[in-house]
Amino acid sequence: MWRARPKAALRPLLAAGATLIGKTKTDELACGMFGENPHDGAPTNPAAPDRVPGGSSSGSATLVAAGAADFALGTDTGGSVRVPASFCGIFGIRTTHGRISTAGLMPMAPSFDTIGWFARDAAMLRRVGETYFGPITPARPRRLLLATDALALCEPRVADALRAVLPAAEPVTLYTEGVAHWLDTFRPLQLGELNATHATWALAPGRNLSPAVRERIELSTTITDAAIARAWPQREALAVRLHALLGDGTMLLLPTAHDLPPHRPAGVQAQITFRERTLALTCVASLCRLPQVSMPVARVDGVPVGLSLLAAPMQDAALLGAVEAL
């Protein structure tokens, strides 16, 4: 029996007849890409038990991948639904920023935070979406693009596996400003908001934080007002260009993560190195407030590899229909 007022995002699902069976774990403070929480443990990745499940929405992803639930909600700021979906071999959507209410949720970086969900197949992913967006008809996108420079960021074995299953698409250059420009725009904004929401509490004397989360929050204290001021107009310029690129029913393919999930346990330095490379892929939707679905399309040495599809803002329903059609 629900003993507290349900979060706003849950209400349409409960009203549609969904049954809540539990609350899952995340990375500490939802601040991580790997799903390892030293206080509560890390859930096992059912698709690759010797590797991390991905985070921060690790509990939700592993529950669905294990078949214990038909779908599960997660949150996505910089990849926290998309990455575990890829690592666990399931579908996961990050919705358009602001499309689904985050009321009642703990914020991390509010101008990036979104609601998303996981499912084992595209039909269930769509059915959950219909509770928020209304009826969805599966239909291929009017125009399909492939970000070839994003594919080039992947490790060769991952890139080769994706090339083998890619649908016909027009090649396009995504990072016309350079990958560094995208990351230099994302970092100060996301870290600046993390600092505002959590740093005072997290860095109080005696606070017991994991090394990886402490590293992120301590890094957030080094972000200057000048860096944030430079990043805001850069973000808007990137968003304007991507929104124009994805207009009139166009959608964009790119890898979800640059490599297979790291083996457990992932040390702090290994996490930093991996995170920076995959953030180059996940920051696109985060910065431009776009909906994105990660689809399980291939395996390398038995480990899942995800391919993502992005659409224009507010085109979540069309995106879910396109994923099912593809």
Image (spheres, grey):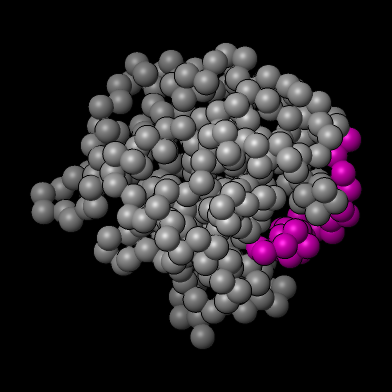
| Residue 162 placement: quadrant | top right
Q: Position of residue 46 (x, y in %)?
A: 52, 67
Q: Residue at x 57, y 14 (%)?
A: 177
Q: Position of residue 317 (x, y in %)?
A: 78, 49
Residue 254, can we see it? Answer: yes
Q: Camera-side residue: 308 or 155? A: 155
Q: How many marks?
A: 0
Q: Camera-side residue: 243 or 42? A: 42
Q: Residue at x 34, y 50 (%)?
A: 266
Determine whether 210 is above or below 145 in the image: below
Residue 282: in magenta span:
no
Residue found farthest to the front = 301
Q: Position of residue 247 (x, y in %)?
A: 80, 28
Q: Residue at x 30, y 21 (%)?
A: 224
Determine whether 189 is above or below 92 in the image: above
Determine whether 230 is above or below 223 in the image: above
Residue 133: in magenta span:
yes
24 displayed left or right of 224: right
Which portion, as a residue range, is magenta? Answer: 119-142
